[in-house]
Image (cartoon, rainbow, N blue to C red):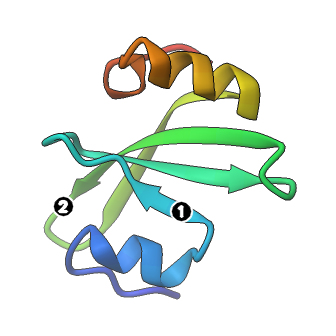
Amino acid sequence: MAYWAEPGDITETFGSADLLGNGSDRVVFDIAGNNYRMICKYHFGVTRVHLYIKWIGTHAEYTNLCDDSKQYTVNSY
């Protein structure tokens, strides 16, 4: 069990995760040796942290999202 008090704790637990920044509440995970990416929205509740999957795709598809700055708003997987 992990105890997360702030967003940076997510990346401490998952070394392959990066916070997206830009004021967003999203984290991106590298999957399968960085061949795939998963974007999750995080929410810190009173006793739990919730991760909501917002998008899953290949690394190339993620690069395209970033080129259009859509990694902050995408909501389909």
* Type of amino acid under label 1: Ala
User: Nearer the viewer's eye, disc 2 or disc 1?
Assistant: 1
Does residue 23 appear left or right of residue 68 in this picture? left
Q: To which quarter of the image does residue 60 belong?
A: top right
Question: What residue is pinned by disc 2?
Answer: 45
Kindly identify the residue that appears in the image at 13 percent across and 42 percent down.
Answer: 23
* Type of amino acid under label 2: Gly
Q: To which quarter of the image does residue 26 belong?
A: top left
Question: What residue is pinned by disc 1?
Answer: 17
The image shows residue 55 at horizontal and vertical percentages of 57, 26
Query: Compared to 58, does 67 lie above or below?
Result: above
Mark 2–mark 1 Cα distance, whole angstroms, equals 20 Å
Q: Nearer the viewer, residue 53 or 71?
A: 71
Q: Nearer the viewer, residue 1 or 77?
A: 77
Classify mark 2: residues with Cα within 10 Å, few (<14), some (14-19) or many (20+). few
Q: Earlier in the sequence, mark 2 or mark 1?
A: 1
Query: Compared to 1, does 30 lie above or below?
Result: above
Q: Secondary structure at mark 2?
A: loop
Does residue 69 appear left or right of residue 66 in this picture? left
Q: Secondary structure at mark 1?
A: strand
Kindly identify the residue that appears in the image at 42 percent across and 26 percent down.
Answer: 71
The image shows residue 70 at horizontal and vertical percentages of 39, 16
Kindly identify the residue that appears in the image at 54 percent across and 13 percent down.
Answer: 76
- The quadrant of the picture occupied by the C terminus is top right
The image shows residue 19 at horizontal and vertical percentages of 36, 56
